[in-house]
Amino acid sequence: MLAEALAEFKKQNNIHNTKLCALGEWIEKLKDQDKKDAESLLFDDPISNHRLSLFLKTIGFEVSTETIRKHRMKGCACLWMN
Ligand SMILES: [Zn+2]
């Protein structure tokens, strides 16, 4: 009930996938397997936020540990539809 109303609200306000945190934007730009790997890295692997930020830096994406933490906790700007 709430999910439907919320989906409709977001549709009407055109806020579906228009606002993402830095990490969300980066993931959104990735393609197919890269995207799956990135999501798996964030949500399935027990790697610390700090180590993850160091790793991402080595592949050219600089993001703060705080951004990673918030994204993992789903407390960032990204709109979590699930
Ligand atoms: Zn995010």
Image (spheres, rainbow, N blue to C red):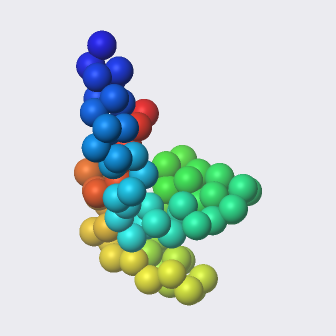
Q: Nearer the viewer, residue 72 or 77?
A: 77
Picture quarter containing residue 30? bottom right
Q: From the viewer's perspective, is residue 1 above or below residue 70?
A: above
Q: Nearer the viewer, residue 62 or 55?
A: 62
Q: Nearer the viewer, residue 51 or 17?
A: 17
Going by the image, does 12 lie left or right of 45? Answer: left
Location of residue 13 in the rendering, given as x and y in whole percent from the top left corner: 28, 43
Q: Residue at x 28, y 56 (%)?
A: 76
Q: Residue at x 60, y 83 (%)?
A: 59
Residue ranking furthest to the front: 12
Going by the image, does 34 lie left or right of 62? Answer: right
Picture quarter containing residue 32? bottom right
Please state, as top left, top right, bottom left or bottom right, where the C terminus lies in the image. top left
Q: Nearer the viewer, residue 20 or 74?
A: 20
Q: From the viewer's perspective, is residue 79 above or below residue 51?
A: above
Residue 32 seen = yes
